[in-house]
Amino acid sequence: MGVTGPPGPVMDRDEVDRALARLGAEHEAIETSLLALQDHAGRRLLEGARLTGVTKERWAAAEASITLLWTYFDAYTDALRSAREIRSRRRWSSREDLVELTELLRGESVTVAGSAAATANAPTLHGTGKLSQSFSLATLVDRMNELYAASLDMVVAADAVWSALPARIDLLAAELQRTRRLAHSVGVRPGEHPAGDDLERITDTLTRLREEVVSDPLAYWVPAQGSSAPGGGRPDTTVYDREARALEDVRREIDAVLTVRQEAEQRLVKLRDVLSRADRTLAEARTARGEVLAKIAATEVPVVSGPPTVLQEQLATAAEYRRHGQWHRLSPLLESLEQKAEDELLRARESLTAVTAPLAVRAELRGRLDAYKAKVARHGLAEDPFLIERYDAARRMLWSAPCDLRVAEQAVLRYQQAAAELLSAPRVPDQGGPEDHRGER
């Protein structure tokens, strides 16, 4: 060992003692870490698992690294033991001892058989396949730290995925089975309802996902950007999260179907009522149209159509679905029918309004005529012959059948104008005779 001489100045006793203390502490820390890695649950799982894909490749390299780690550690232990033995020969080490210790503690004095690294299939600092390799203790510690960090990173990542995903997948699969049973109870089955098809797809995806996670956990690991700490990263839950959302959507669909089952009769009764009201309104509109044609002259009255038979047919189909418990088919049909029934009722009301519009105009003219008559009476002009004449003319037109609304409206306007002129004209004091302030008519 002393052929080429010590690397650099010979260490004194204090330097040797400090180096041995530091190396001893490093030895203890490395041993503790290696034993913890040996007992790590993730490593035990990896040893017993049937691995595939990237995890299989990385575990083969990690196993080789762990084997090489112990080889390096044994060599490190032997070198440290040798250094301690030399130092313990005498209380005050001789120069020869210090030279030997300097070479051992600072030089490339630790020899590891190259075949060990090659057999382990792990990378070394100087390649593989050599008969032997020599390291300084410091270099050997750095090398062990590198191999340990890489091995621990792989073990921790696999263990994190196994700890996070399979249990969550199992819980989701259990919820999936409950949802499937509930779906079947309301007729939601594959090939018959989209939600049934979704359940089949989610089942297949979860089964495949669990198999892949168990055999190749590292395929579902996302390393943390910029992190050098072992195990820095997180499990990739993208597929799991997507299927969980899809199952939640299916659950909402099933809940909607269950709600239909619970409320079907009530909703069908309401539907029948809405359609019945629409029919009655249309019948009223048809009756009103005949009345308008008889009472109002020179008016275009829209034709009133009959009730659509397709809605009654769909209502009968809905009732049939309910009787046979076909809730998944009843649900969309009821939603469609409810909207169409409301639209039909609105259409019937609009038809009635359009048909009765002339009667409403006539009623408005009658009301206006009577309102002006009352106003004239309040001002003491009810007995005015001219106003009486115009009032009677307008009234005959409005209360006769058929009523010509355009002519009647002009008569009402003439009465209003005459009344307005009387009400705005200067009043002559009463001399015992009738007022005559209108002039010629």
Image (cartoon, grey):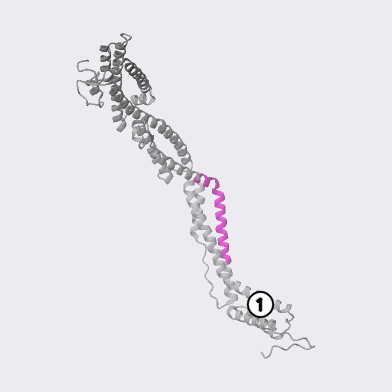
Q: Quadrant of residue 168?
A: top left
Q: Is residue 390 left or right of residue 322?
A: right
Q: Nearer the viewer, residue 277 or 312?
A: 277
Quadrant that contains the C terminus: bottom right
Q: Is residue 199 located in the magenta-colored stretch of the structure? A: no
* Total numbered circles: 1
Quadrant that contains the N terminus: top left
Q: Return the residue at label 1.
A: 369
Q: Bin the neighbour count of mark 1 within 10 Å (Cα to Cα): few under 14, some 14-19, many 20 and up.
A: many
Q: Quadrant of residue 62?
A: top left
Q: Is residue 183 left or right of residue 109?
A: right
Q: Is residue 261 located in the magenta-colored stretch of the structure? A: yes
Q: Is residue 428 left or right of residue 401?
A: right
Is there any visible trace of residue 58 in the rendered image? yes
Is there any visible trace of residue 326 in the rendered image? no
Horizontal and vertical percent for residue 105?
28, 18
Q: Nearer the viewer, residue 299 or 230?
A: 230
Q: Which residues are magenta?
A: 256-284
SS under mark 1: helix
User: In the image, what residue occupies the spot 63% across and 80% down?
Assistant: 412
